[in-house]
Image: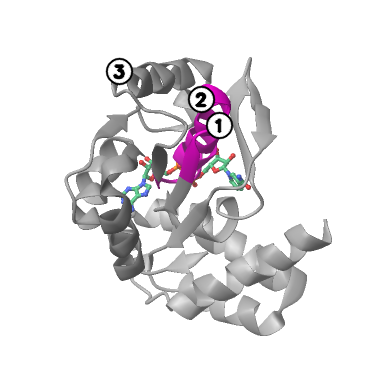
Amino acid sequence: MKQGLIQLRDFIAAHADSIVVLADKHTLDDCYPLLGADLPYVTVPYGEGYKNLNSCEYIWKKLTELNASRQTILLCLGGGVLCDMGAFAGACYQRGMRVVLVPTSLLAMVDASTGGKTGVNFLGFKNYIGLFAQAEETFICPTFLETLPYSERVNGYVEMLKHGLIADRNHYNKVKMLFLKENSKLDNALILDSIAIKQRHVEQD
Ligand SMILES: NC(=O)c1ccc[n+]([C@@H]2O[C@H](COP(=O)([O-])OP(=O)(O)OC[C@H]3O[C@@H](n4cnc5c(N)ncnc54)[C@H](O)[C@@H]3O)[C@@H](O)[C@H]2O)c1
């Protein structure tokens, strides 16, 4: 797992010829410009309702039109919906292309970025079709959170509170303070602590 926009931009500069970005409208408008490169991209509609096999089929169609191969890197730029679905679509495309996760929501950073769970919803069942597939690399860049609406931030805070409750009272107390003010400053170290707690639990599983 790597951290920060500089590391992400370095990675992109080194692999620019082989990257296709997967984004939704929000992350295309707000996050893609921060990548610092003019990369080919595929967009899918945002929201849980589009986390399905139809969207995957659309992604596979667009990858084929772009002549993507197994060596192509699918850079998933988005929240948990986009990262779960992109990682699944990438794992299936030509029996597995390269996948890099760039979670842009707080929940995706502290939860969906770890553990290799990928998948989509099916017939009303959540995450019903999927597989375990570790991304080749994951970049945690808190800068992306600057455009994340407060209501979405709170989903991440709740998950971080859970990490505190499970493993670390001090972490819990610090996260609790974030709920008090809408514009509370989120310390990057708290994000990394939450990821570390999640990683420890994934390893124990
Ligand atoms: N794989 C796992 O281990 C795991 C763990 C937890 C949750 N999940 C999955 O994560 C999903 C929920 O993820 P979520 O809470 O990130 O929701 P989401 O992916 O729907 O993202 C929420 C909204 O925020 C927007 N957004 C994301 N980043 C943004 C940014 N930087 N600026 C502006 N807008 C931005 C998205 O476009 C979307 O509209 C669920 O489908 C859940 O199943 C997976």
Mark 2 neighbour density, 10 Å: few (under 14) some (14–19) many (20 or more): many
Badge 1 element: loop
The answer to which quarter of the image holds residue 145 is bottom left
Residue 129 occupies which quadrant of the picture? top right
Q: Earlier in the sequence, mark 3 or mark 2?
A: 3
| Inter-mark Cα distance, 1 to 3 | 17 Å
Secondary structure of the magenta portion, mostly?
helix
Looking at the image, is mark 1 or mark 3 earlier in the sequence? 3
Residue 143 counted in the magenta span:
no
Stretch of the chain drawn in magenta: 77-99
- Closer to the camera, 17 or 91? 17
User: Pointers 1 and 2 in contact (CB under 8 A)?
Assistant: yes
Residue toward you, 73 or 120: 73
Q: Position of residue 28 (x, y in %)?
A: 25, 41
The vertical placement of 98 against 152, above or below, is above
Residue 166 falls left or right of residue 142: right
Q: Which residue is mark 2?
A: 93
Three-letter residue code for mark 3: Glu
**Is 95 colored magenta in this rendering?**
yes
Q: Position of residue 56 (x, y in %)?
A: 47, 22
User: Vertically, is 39 above or below 47?
Assistant: below
Q: Residues within 10 Å of mark 1 (few under 14, many from 20)?
A: some
The crowding category of the residue bearing disc 3, from other C-alpha atoms within 10 Å (few below 14, some 14 to 19, many at least 20), is few
SS category of the residue bearing label 2: helix
**Residue at 22% over, 57% down:** 34
| Numbered badge on residue 65 | 3
The percent position of residue 81, horizontal first and vertical second, equals: 49, 38
Q: Which residue is mark 1?
A: 96
Query: Does the residue tagged 3 have its C-beta within 8 Å of any atom of ligand 1?
Result: no
